[in-house]
Image (cartoon, rainbow, N blue to C red):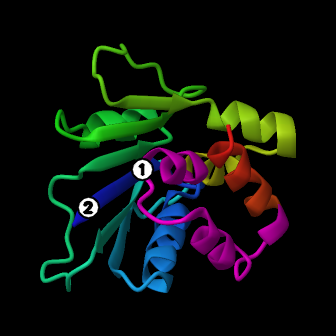
């Protein structure tokens, strides 16, 4: 079983990325649970999307201590930091010390702005990078799920930017 916590601020798409990951895992026959938390003022405050993926049924579908943190915002990362978690983060928005061996940064926001002219797709760049780095689900499964969501073409391109980076 692996638990992944996506953190950012409202409007960055962390809940969508978390949901797509859970859908891709289910498509592969894995057990998946997804939950989210955000404040009453969704835009601009800390938001999180949690995904649990397991080969066995998930008895307790709550992430208490994530194995992986995917961070799009420094404030959210600080709030949910775990010394034991692998950290996949947007290095164009977050500066980490590099002291932790399992910090994996990609300039997701900068890449999305350059290639798609919108930071809205940075979440998919990070999702692609997460899938590449962990192999938690296949890229093909994520691409199939993306086809069912709005802005499929743009999201697919963003995902591939992160995956093939």
Residue 152 higher or lower than 155, as above or below? below
Please name whichever residue, 34 or 76, is drawn nearer the observer in this view of the structure: 34
Can the viewer see residue 117?
A: no
Dividing the picture into quadrants, the one containing residue 75 is top left
Q: Which residue is under mark 1?
A: 134
In percent of the image, x 75 and y 41: which residue is there?
A: 112
Q: Which mark is residue 47?
A: none
Q: Quadrant of residue 30?
A: bottom left
Quadrant into which the N terminus falls: bottom left
| Tag 2 secondary structure | strand
Front residue of 6 and 86: 86
Give the position of the C terminus as an image quadrant: top right
Location of residue 13 by image quarter: bottom right
Does any portion of residue 147 appear in the rendered image? yes
- Answer whether residue 116 is magenta in the image: no
Circle 2 or circle 1, nearest the eye: 1
Q: Are marks 2 and 1 in contact (CB under 8 Å)?
A: yes
User: For residue 152: magenta?
Assistant: yes
16 relative position to 35: left or right:
right
Q: Mark 1 falls on what kind of element? A: helix
| Magenta-tinted stretch | 127-153
Disc 2 or 1, which lies upstream in sequence?
Answer: 2
Residue 7: x and y, percent?
41, 49
Eyeballing the image, is 143 above or below 41? below
User: Residue 115 at x, y = what percent?
Assistant: 85, 40
- Per the rendering, the mark at residue 2 is 2
In the image, residue 135 sits, relative to residue 142, either above or below, namely above
Q: Determine crowd level at label 1: few under 14, some 14-19, many 20+ residues with C-alpha closer than 10 A.
A: few
Q: Percent position (x, y) of residue 57?
A: 20, 86
* Disc 2 from disc 1: Cα separation: 11 Å
The residue under the point 54% across, 71% down is 20
């Amino acid at each position: 079983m692996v638990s992944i916590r996506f953190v950012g601020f409202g409007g960055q798409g962390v809940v969508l990325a978390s949901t797509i990951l859970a859908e891709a895992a289910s498509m592969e026959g894995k057990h998946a649970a997804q939950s989210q938390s955000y404040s009453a003022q969704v835009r601009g405050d800390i938001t999180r999307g949690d995904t649990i993926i397991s080969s066995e049924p998930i008895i307790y579908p709550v992430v208490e201590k994530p194995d992986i943190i995917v961070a799009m915002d420094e404030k959210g990362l600080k709030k949910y930091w775990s010394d034991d978690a692998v950290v996949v983060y947007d290095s164009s928005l977050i500066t980490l010390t590099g002291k932790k061996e399992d910090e994996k940064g990609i300039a997701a926001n900068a890449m999305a702005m350059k290639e798609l002219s919108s930071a809205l797709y940075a979440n998919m760049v990070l999702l692609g990078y997460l899938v590449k780095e962990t192999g938690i689900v296949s890229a093909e499964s994520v691409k199939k799920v993306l086809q069912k969501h709005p802005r499929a073409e743009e999201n697919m391109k963003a995902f591939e930017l992160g995956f093939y980076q």
